[in-house]
Image: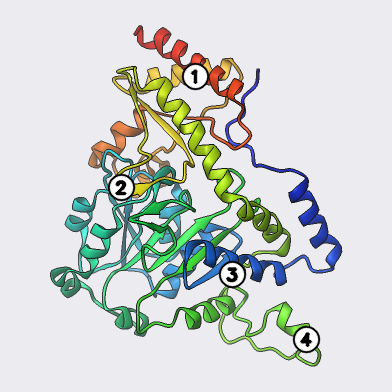
Amino acid sequence: MKVPFAPPRMDQKVIDEVTDTLLSGWITTGPKTKRFEKELAQYCNAENVLALNSATAGLEIMLRWFGVKEGDEVILPAYTYSATANVVIHCGAKPVFADIGNDFNIDVANIRKLITPKTKVIMPVDFGGFPCDYDAINALVKADDIKKTFVAENDVQKKLGRILVLSDAAHSFGAVYKGKKTGTLTDVTVFSFHAVKNLTTAEGGAVALNLPAPFSNQEVYNYLCIYTLHGQNKDALAKMQKGNWRYDIIEAGYKCNMTDIMASIGLVELSRYDETIARRKELTENYNKAFERFNWALLPPSVTPSAETCYHLYALRINGCSEAQRDAIMQKMFDKDIAVNMHFLPVPMLSFYKNLGYQITDYPVAHKTCISEISLPLFYNLTDEQQQFVISSLQEAVAEVLKK
């Protein structure tokens, strides 16, 4: 039996919707992309949502919108994918890594210690789909002593008057915190719709705007539509209106728009997304029931009194194992044609960042966590039979490697 890690849910409904787009004569940013944006906003209860070609583009665009530049600092967790840090580097700013807590997410107490007058943005990451403690993060940036340290250097920063909270919610579309879905929990939220995400558009992402007054989220959305399409003041959809061909370039913008082909997949995925989450929750509960009796198994966070994950990853930690033992367990799974993964190698462990002077020893919880983590297959079409094979195979692998 072969068990893949996280293949997308592609079926006739998706094929029909994409085919409809291909035959419509409109395959780039057009009516389906705009419809997708509106339905995303409705699902999240966000004021405005901009669909783009990746979450990475969304993160960088919002950093640049806020004016992040050389000499600035952005605080983010050490335990994340490199994209979260790379966009900071692209802007010429300095990534400042914070350690994490036992839930894989950024440690808010650690954030406070790292804030300086150079701090412009905090980028929390919802690991595996489980939301960060946003009440604590939002309270931190609004605290009088923290606001006094903030140095506004442009009109946007002056209007906000504090550190921006830019949530990297690449994993957490549909997750809930204190009764609210991700997309409305911080100033700005960025989602990913990459092929392995719960909701996919093959590639793709979105920016959900929830900026406080006196910002107009509609005005910011309108500007971002221009900024993400070369700085052109009319998109192709607008230019196709009779006699409306004339356009202008108002700044040197970027090119990261979503296409209607991508949006077609997303519209189908979104229409059945609650069903997707329900199945992923069922599979997660099956894993939990199978492993909770073993003292070597540290289950991933899923439901607490304040939050519920969207069940993106099943990130199991193996208590008491070394990195070599974790790798040996993974190899035994591979030998049975079971695709497992590891999320993530902390950014300070990666060569580019090590060469900048970052050291993983400065982030002990992140380091300890990565040594013991194994991500198990979790996707809508995973069958009960496949999952039971994963469970029994992992139990055998752990017993053989750890002698437990």
**What is the CA distance from the residue labelled 1 to the residue labelled 2?**
40 Å
Q: Nearer the viewer, mark 4 or mark 3?
A: 3
Q: Nearer the viewer, mark 2 or mark 4?
A: 4
Identified by mark 3, the residue type is Lys
Q: Tell me the residue that label 3 is attached to.
A: 38
Place of residue 316 in the rendered image (x, y in percent of width and height, measured from the top left): 40, 29
Identified by mark 4, the residue type is Gln
Residue 369 or residue 353, whichever sits in front = 369
Residue 122 lies in what quarter of the image? bottom left
- Residue at 69% in and 54% down: 265
Q: Secondary structure at mark 4?
A: loop
Q: Secondary structure at mark 1?
A: helix
- Circle nearer the N terminus (3, 2): 3
- Circle nearer the N terminus (4, 3): 3
**Which image quarter is the C terminus in?**
top left
Q: Tell me the residue that label 2 is attached to.
A: 357
Residue 231 lies in what quarter of the image? bottom right
Identified by mark 1, the residue type is Ile
**What is the CA distance from the residue labelled 2 to the residue labelled 4?**
54 Å
- Locate residue 24 relative to residue 404 in the image: left or right: right
Q: Tell me the residue that label 4 is attached to.
A: 241
Label 2 Cα neighbours within 10 Å, binned few <14 / some 14-19 / many ≥20:
few
Indicate whether 263 appears above or below 147: above
- Locate residue 115 relative to residue 203 in the image: left or right: left
Is label 4 in contact with label 3 (beta carbons under 8 Å)?
Answer: no
